Amino acid sequence: MRQISKKMIPSIKIEDYKYPLTEDRIAKYPLEERDASKLLIYRDAEISERQFKNLPEYIPEGSFMVFNDTKVVPARLHFKRDSGAHIEIFCLQPVEPSDYAQAFASTESCSWQCVIGNAKRWKEDLLSYYIPEGSEDERMRELALKARLISREGQTGVVEFSWKGGEVFSNVLEACGKVPIPPYLNRDTEQIDTERYQTVYAHFRGSVAAPTAGLHFTERELARLREKKVSLNTVCLHVGAGTFLPVKSSDVSEHTMHREPFVVKKSFLKALIERKSKLVAVGTTSVRTLESLYYIGVSIMENSEPRDVNQWDPYLRDYEYSTEQALKAIVDYMEANGLEELKTGTRIIIVPGFKFRLVDMLITNFHQSESTLILLVAAFVGEDWRKIYDYALSNGFRFLSYGDSSLLFRKEL
């Protein structure tokens, strides 16, 4: 493997991307109506505001819009040791079988990479699922869900789950699991989260965090966009728990990005090549998927096969290939191998200095201070990110997952 010189990597101080977010500005619950949230519009260095229901008015007719149709799974499970100690297990990604669809279709057992709460209290014993006192859900008892620790490293480990009744694992999670709402909400999961921490177009199970920009959409906005001949398209990137991880290093070059798997269809790639209009990405996960495609195509052109996009790939050299060449390389590879969809992964980090090759407009929420998502916004709009956040703070906008939204037009840097 080629050694990466630190000279190739942008040197960025994370403290330069700090802003004062107080607890009272964090939206703890969603609004009663999804599209009643505020919408900040940033275009040509000017800021205005409307409600999200007005979004279609600002999307150019005939635009190419991309949504992430991943579905959040109730991935947080509670178990109890014979000693009485409670162990929380948070499923991150499947290990055996490693394919998400196959893991969710398992009927007796499967193993997952997990975050383990109270990990020191869990030795080698088999844990039983904890059924809260007074629960009348007989289904939980019939499943007799168990967890066995296969391996552990710090707070994470591989856990094997087993159960009875021939149910598929996705149904086991629906019966026993809780929606893993973000830790910064500082509250337990409630019934409202089952519906509202999910987009109306969610389809493929696999995320442990919602692609939150999409939480504002209702069928009304989607219908109005179709009326404007906007092409509505989907990709699927399963959002990992790493989306909540802060950048702990003072220099971003020391931060390690987590891997997230994604899937794109050949028909989508062909439409992407043929489009003649502006591309609107709904959420940072859609941006990361779309911008990763270029480097997947480069990998095919140079190595004859696709590989995961590494964190610093975009910054290591100047790439001579056009975006169209890269996308066509993926399509050609898929046709040569009889593939209708490509499954791969990305660790891409988008920071100031990044060269955007596909995305022109971005719909996104307001993100945590000193996070990789703030860095992505700063890469997209330049130093005006601070003007945008100052405006939101001064004008009553709600922040983070259940907060308000923004429509950002990319600033040519």
Image: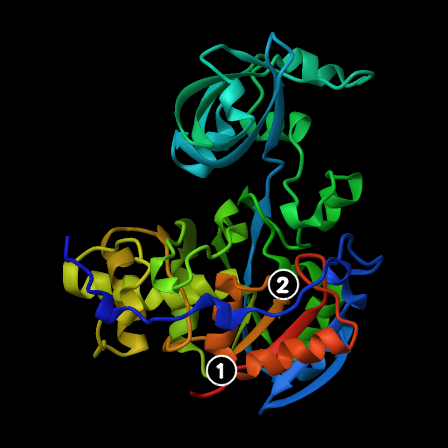
Q: Label 1 neighbourhood size at 10 Å, few (<14), some (14-19), many (20+)?
A: some
State the scheme by which the image is colored.
Answer: rainbow
Please state the horizontal and vertical placement of residue 268, each as a whole percent of the image: 44, 64
Question: Can see residue 59?
Answer: no
Horizontal side of residue 301 vs 32, given as left or right: left
| SS for callout 1 | loop
Q: Nearer the viewer, mark 1 or mark 2?
A: 1
Please state the horizontal and vertical placement of residue 319, each as a whole percent of the image: 23, 76
Looking at the picture, does residue 64 appear above or below residue 264? below
Looking at the picture, does residue 93 appear above or below residue 413? above
Type of amino acid at the residue the image marks with label 2: Ala
> Residue 214: which quarter of the image?
bottom right
Type of amino acid at the residue the image marks with label 1: Gly
Looking at the picture, does residue 164 appear above or below residue 330? above
Label 1 to label 2: alpha-carbon separation:
20 Å
Q: Quadrant of the C terminus?
A: bottom left
Closer to the camera in the image, 107 or 2:
2
Q: Which mark is residue 382?
A: 1
